[in-house]
DNA sequence: CCTGCAAATGTTATAATGTTTCAAATTTTG
DNA sequence: CAAAATTTGAAACATTATAACATTTGCAGG
């Protein structure tokens, strides 16, 4: 896996997409999971940008593909992709984003720009460590961490009206 | 403010509620905010346990009070209470819980037991520090942190079938 | 190749959560 | 008190997610 693009800055995003799809195929093969046409298409749609996409946005895109889809189709695909660590749900936005650390066994931390809407996924081991420690001090067995930071990305701090 | 009760363990919960209401009155007075009857009642309902309550649950309770309320009534009250730091929204559950650090200017971290449903709110400065650091390393200006840990509370680790 | 099973998808309906809008009532201010 | 601002009421609507059951597809064993 090559160096990761920074969503906030212009980059060859097609490369992001094709890398994600390639990785996904490999991961599913390794896990004996079936990355069917719909699932792959949903993953591709989720990856169309670094901004989280709502389930109904995915649905709309599928429809404009000519695919006559209903909500369960999308939610099922998204469940599958989450299960296999290919997308994340951003709880604070009710939306989904492609995982940039697929196959890496990580706890994501998401930096969400409230202006441009782009999201950067980080793996911050020091944060995870402190979280685990804090939970352990309470005798709590942590299983799943939701960590989403809303704020301003570097670009939007500089020029507030950007896409 | 006295020592905080641990939600997972039996305690005199009426004391939690009356403490919360007393604190809320003081805080609103200090901030020149109007803790109206509805708002106070919603806060009280939220505090009826240490389990997060959905907006529509609050609505149902209001209705059984005889109060003929509609969704906006509840959401407005909850907005107010959030604004003034009296309740938190748990994004991963679409539900609300009373703040146990009201007036303290804090970033909450929530330990959510997936079995009993109780939630413990912590202030973990070391976590906040690491989060800020990680964000800063990316040049990101963090404004709002959502940090929710799902797992098993001490009690439910010991005896899995408890309330 | 067929048959039968399991996984995946289609389809319809419905549940759960949250917002917009405008009107009426209440509180505050001068 | 009168004007202005805040709060609440009420109805409709929008968005997000799931339930239930029928149908199709992929695949293993015979
Ligand atoms: Zn990209
Ligand atoms: Zn990830
Ligand atoms: Zn209590
Ligand atoms: Zn709090």
Image (cartoon, coloured by chain):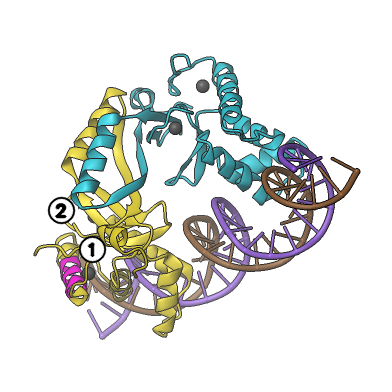
Chain colours: A yellow, B cyan, C purple, D brown
- The answer for which chain carries disc 1 is A
Residue A67, percent from left and from top: 41, 82
Say which residue appears at 40% left-offset and 37% top-offset. Answer: B114
Say which residue appears at 23% left-offset and 63% top-offset. Answer: A33
Please determine whether, in this image, residue A81 is positioned above or below residue A39: above
Labels 1 and 2 within one chain: yes
Q: Nearer the viewer, residue D25 or A25?
A: A25
Tell whether B6 sits left or right of A107: right
The prevailing secondary structure element of the residues shown in magenta is helix
Residue B89, percent from left and from top: 48, 42
Q: Nearer the viewer, residue A1 or B23?
A: B23
Q: Nearer the viewer, residue D25 or A27?
A: A27
Looking at the image, which residue sits at the far left? A2
Q: Is mark 2 within 8 Å of ligand 2?
A: yes
Residue range in magenta is: A15-25
Residue A33: numbered disc: 1
């Amino acid at each position: 896996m090559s160096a990761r693009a920074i969503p906030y800055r212009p980059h060859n995003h097609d490369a992001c997409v094709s890398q994600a799809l390639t990785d996904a195929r490999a991961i599913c093969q390794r896990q004996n999971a079936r990355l069917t046409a719909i699932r792959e298409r949903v993953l591709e749609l989720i990856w169309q940008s670094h901004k989280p996409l709502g389930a109904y946005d995915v649905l709309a895109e599928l429809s404009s593909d000519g695919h006559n889809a209903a909500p369960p189709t999308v939610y099922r695909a998204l469940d599958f992709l989450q299960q296999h660590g290919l997308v994340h749900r951003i709880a604070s936005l009710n939306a989904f984003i492609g995982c940039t650390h697929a196959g890496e066994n990580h706890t994501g931390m998401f930096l969400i720009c409230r202006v441009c809407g782009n999201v950067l996924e980080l793996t911050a081991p020091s944060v995870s460590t402190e979280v685990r420690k804090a939970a352990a001090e309470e005798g709590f067995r942590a299983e799943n961490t939701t960590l989403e930071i809303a704020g301003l990305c570097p670009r939007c701090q500089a020029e507030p009206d950007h896409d």
